[in-house]
Structure formats: structure tokens, C-alpha cells
Amino acid sequence: MKLPKAQEIDFDLDRYINRYLPQSQLHRLPWPIARFLGYRRVPQPEVGNLLVCAWAFVGAFSGLILVMGVFKSSETIQAHHPPLVVASLGATAILDYQTIQSPLAQPRSSILGHVLGAVVGVGVTKLFMLRSDFEDLRWVAGAVCTALASLVMGLTNTVHPPGGATALLAAVDPTVDAMGWFFVPLVLIGSLLMLGCALVVNNIQRQFPMFWWTPRDVGRKRGPPDIEKTSEVPQEGRERRISRAVGLLRENSIVITPDQVVIPDGFTLGLEEKGILEVLRDRLRNPDHLKNIEIIKATVGVSHPVILLSAGVGVTPLVSLLNTITHAASIQRRIHFIHGSRGTLTRAFKDHDQALEKKVPRIRVTFAKPID
């Protein structure tokens, strides 16, 4: 039996546990409550960076003031002589209020990342404290805590960079290590308060969270419903067809019209899926179905490689074009797909593009180095 190469091994915890998790029930809650828990009937429009910065300022200030106020006023917490605030929550404030669409800022990572970091940090520190020369080894304990926390967060899909700082604090800060295991619930309280503030501030003009546990499907999968093409029911009028389509929402269907995108209750969208739906909606507003065909025809009579350039959300139509050209039998030249984005976390369709590159040797996918 041939053992797999190290770079081919991929452990995904969600692959084993998502099937046992219940689907989101946010749509069953009263609308004002569901809204401030991140639920939307239609995708939330994006806002400009000035509003993003303004709300991030309000959120970071409110969240940290709330945490420090609770720590300072609670007699139970003060009895353990805690620091004024867990310093790593300052980094969480940037993620939770500024980059709210990042997977690193979603509740699963934000809460469990901190808690796992605290558990690892306190546990490892207590083991080191069994030695008489702990003070001389405190710097080694800090490195071990952070490294082990990174490993645990990676394996549990709860990566939250401030969680590494939480683990580090448990080893290098004498005030924190004196608290012992009480540091874990303290971090949990702080993380929950930050999340609660984020649910209020981030849902006034934006949407948060993008998902609570995972953007992927959870629960047992059902067979896909039959799709009825409008060409098969020409006797029905446009309004009646739309009415029937809306009725199919109960069977997990999505309705796209030039005015809006309607998704089923309890259905969540990832960033890539949201971009696809918006592109389809825009095509309905100004249908131009021959664009891809015209581009393919234009590339047949030339000998140089095909080069596709995209940036940011513009990658969505380019991926569609890449797929079309790839499967066009009349085009057998090299294809260079180059995409630029602000950061490594916003590279939509990265896995799809790289899989296509491995499958088709004549395709070369390049991601431009981000500014950050």
C-alpha cells in the first residue's frame, strides 16, 4: 500500500461533523431579532470604506469599553485580580468590526479560537510551572503555547490570530498565569461581549456574521428538486411563472429577477456564491448572452496564448469565461489566468482555479501579490 505524500494529506474536521449539525433556524425568529443575528432575506448591499471605518471605530470603542466595564465592575472577576483587559481582545476588535467578512472574524473562530488558545496556554504553562526554574523558561513556554494553539485552531477550523496572543499571555504575563484556569472563562466572557457588541453595531448598515459555524451545508443532504424550464411551460404568463418560482422556495430554490435575489429561509451564502448571484442578476438587467461566444470566436483565429486578467469581485465572470474556453474544443493554446486582490483571504474561486490548473496542463493560474 502506497502512503500518500505529506502535501496530499488534508484533514477537515467539518467533513465528519457537519452532517450531524442542525440547519440554521434564524429565519424562524422575529425579523428584528433575526436581522441582528446576521440573517437577511436578500444579500446585504456593500457599503463604502468610509462607513466601514466609521462603524469600525464605533464598534472597537464600544466593544472594549463594554468588556473593561464588566471586568472592572464584577466582584467575582476582581476577586481573581485580572488585568484591566485581555490584551488579545484588542486584535479581535479589528477583526470583529473592521474586516467583518473575513472567515477569521466569524463567531466560530472568534469565540472558539480564543477559548482554545486560553486552554492550551494555561495547560502548557502549568506543566512548565512544575519545574523549579520556570521563570527562566517562561519565554520557551510562551513559544510552545502559541505554536500548539496554532496547531489546535488549524485542526478544528477555528483559526483566529488573536487566539495565539491569548495563549502567549497565559505564559508570559505573571498576572495572567496567577489566575490559573479562571483565565479561560474570563476570555470566554470577553469574547462573548465583543461578539454581542458586534451583532448590534455591524448589522445597522452591514451584515454580520456571514455564517455562525461554516458557509458550507450542514445536516443530511437531500436529493435536488426537479428543475422545470420555462420553455416547457410556454402557456403560462410571466407573472404566474414568477409566482410558481417563489412558491418553490419551500423546496430550497433560489429566485433571481432583475430587481432582486430571493433565497430560501435559513439559507446562507458564502462570498463566492453571493458574487455569482449578483452577476446573474446583473445579466438579467442587461442581458448580453453572446459575450462569451464572441470572445471565444475572437480567440480561434490567433496563435498567441489567451490571457485573462481580473481583480477583486471581477473574478466571477472571468472564471465563467475560463471554464467556457477550457472546454472549447477549438481552442488548444495556453491560457494564462491572472487575478489580483487586496489580500490572500479574499481570493475567491482559488481552489477551483488551482484544481482546473492541475487538470488542464495548458492553463497557468497566477495570483498577484497583494499589497498587504
Image (tube, rainbow, N blue to C red):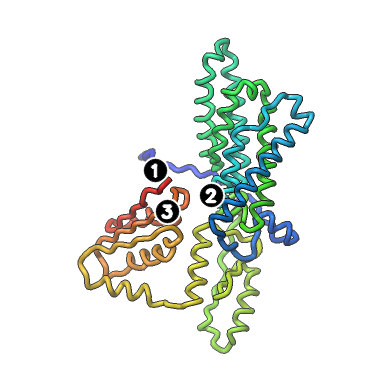
Residue 174, position in %: x, y?
62, 20
Q: In terms of image quadrants, where is residue 62?
A: top right
The label shown at residue 341 is 3
Q: How many marks?
A: 3
The label shown at residue 102 is 2
Check disc 1 and report its element: helix, strand or loop. helix
First reached walking from the N terminus: tag 1 or tag 2: 1
Between 185 and 327, the one lying in front of the other is 185
Spatial separation of the CA atoms under disc 1 and disc 2: 26 Å
Spatial separation of the CA atoms under disc 3 and disc 2: 14 Å
At a point 62% along the width and 46% down the height, the residue shown is 107
Q: Mark 1 = which residue? A: 8
Given contact means CB atoms under 8 Å apart, are the residues at marks 3 and 1 in contact?
A: no
Residue 52, position in %: x, y?
57, 53
Q: Is residue 100 left or right of residue 37?
A: left
Q: Quadrant of the N terminus?
A: top left
Whether 189 is drawn above or below 45: the answer is: above
First reached walking from the N terminus: tag 3 or tag 1: 1
